[in-house]
Amino acid sequence: MHLSRSVADRQVAAGQSLRQALSSTNSTELRRAMLLWLDRKGPFIEDDRQPEVDDYFEYNGLDVTDSGLGEAARRIKANTASLTFSFPDGSTDFAKPKLKVDHGLAEDRIGTYVVGNIWNLEDLADSASNARTPPINWEQLVSTAREQCPQLNIPDAIYSNPALSKEPFDASISDRALILMKYLNDYMVGRTCDGAEGPSAREVVENFFTGDRALFSGESAGNQDTFRAQMTFPDPDDADKNIFAHWHGKISHRFFRLHFEWPVPAKEKHMKILYLGPKITKK
């Protein structure tokens, strides 16, 4: 459940922010737990924000770009399931099961996205209990990725590699890794039987492999030479072979990277994921 870092300072009563309201409670334990969540632990939207070039979203004329509703719309646009939880009785009424969010400026709309919304605690509890259990360790992340991304070859070496296994599990990194792998899976689904890129595969390349802020990119020539050994991984299908894989997906939180075989040989039906862990070329 992601929230904005600014939510603790939002007004929740006349002249009173959420932080101030919590400070007046008699429950020290509740106050401590809530402030720890709101101020330090999150997870926060700002640390795992869905990239969007045309980053402006409105709901009923209200700018929601940097709010939870804006983030949900960004993720839905990127084909990632998202819901919002809202509070009723505010100056803007969000107590509706579907919120239509407009993308782009009023004079130049790009699209509209319908975000499913919950505004009472009973429905929130039901939604949470019926949701898929998220991974709680790196091995579960790999199992979930295999289930959600059948066109990817994700070996056990991903989670058994000390570069990842010694790192504390982080839900934000796990979420972002699943999103990156979904894009790669979409690419493979969009290839034809002879390995050529179909329209949907080319769309993935155009949206996520190009531009200054691309989610996927290759290392510079200098880094390829300097870190060639570190970016060479065992072939999951042949223990006698290695694959040099400098192409990677970016995870900004804790500077993690997801390395994969690229380009994918025409004969391959699955893309090989070769590394998840801290940035290898970090000096």
Image: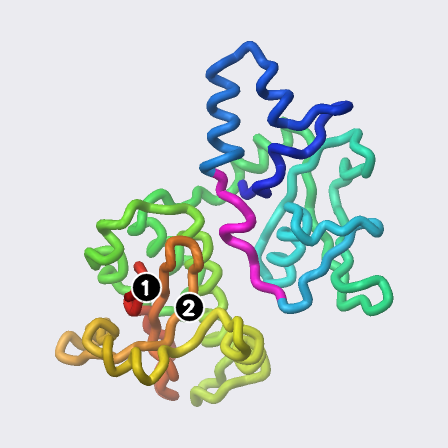
Q: Where on the picture, by quarter, is residue 125?
A: top right
As drawn, 146 above or below 41: below
From the viewer's perspective, is 232 left or right of 279? left
Q: Residues within 10 Å of mark 1 (few under 14, many from 20)?
A: some
From the viewer's perspective, is 131 left or right of 86? left
Query: Bounds of the magenta span?
Result: 42-52
Disc 2 designates what residue? 249
Q: Secondary structure at mark 2?
A: strand
Q: Which mark is residue 279?
A: 1
Image point 47% across, 24% down: which residue? Answer: 33
Main secondary structure type of the part rendered in magenta: loop
Image point 33% across, 73% down: which residue? Answer: 272
Of residues 3 and 20, which is closer to you in this image?
Answer: 20
State yes or no: discs 1 and 2 in contact (Cβ < 8 Å): no
Q: Secondary structure at mark 1?
A: loop
Q: CA distance from mark 1 to mark 2?
A: 10 Å
- Magenta stretch: includes residue 50: yes
Q: Position of residue 224 (x, y in %)?
A: 29, 81
From the viewer's perspective, is 75 left or right of 264? right
As drawn, 227 above or below 69: below
* Res. 100 in view: no
Image point 86% across, 67% down: which residue? Answer: 107
Q: Position of residue 72 (x, y in %)?
A: 63, 51
Q: Position of residue 204 (x, y in %)?
A: 54, 75
